[in-house]
Amino acid sequence: MQRRSLEYYDKILIAIAASLGGGSLAGVATDVDFRLALLAGALLATVFVYDATLRNPPRPPESAQQTYALLGWHLLLALLLLPDLL
């Protein structure tokens, strides 16, 4: 049986899922407010998204699809932060 190693973007996806899952788990298992723990996980996931889309993009940086995906991610993150700031 041939063994396959994980590629860079597979590791990025696992890191994003782990940071969001870890934030959720921290919110459930500790006294930290769930939304705050999830926000911390989302902020950590943003680092991985940034690395995969801007520092090591799978496509040329001129891609409009990449720009829209990055804009959508930050809009979602802002919507998560906004209720806590108001």
Image (cartoon, rainbow, N blue to C red):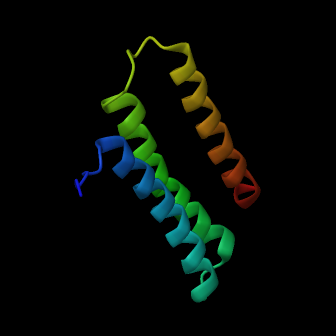
Quadrant occupied by the N terminus: bottom left
Q: Position of residue 12 (x, y in %)?
A: 38, 48
Q: Position of residue 44 (x, y in %)?
A: 45, 56
Residue drawn at 66 percent across, 75 percent down: 34
6 lies above or below 61: below
Furthest-top residue in view? Answer: 62
How many callouts does the rendering have?
A: 0
Furthest-front residue in view? Answer: 1
Given residues 37 and 10, the one toward you in this image is 10
34 lies above or below 46: below
Quarter residue 49 falls in: top left
Quarter residue 51 falls in: top left
Residue drawn at 36 percent across, 42 percent down: 9
Given residues 12 and 83, the one toward you in this image is 12
Given residues 6 and 78, the one toward you in this image is 6
Residue drawn at 63 percent across, 47 percent down: 77
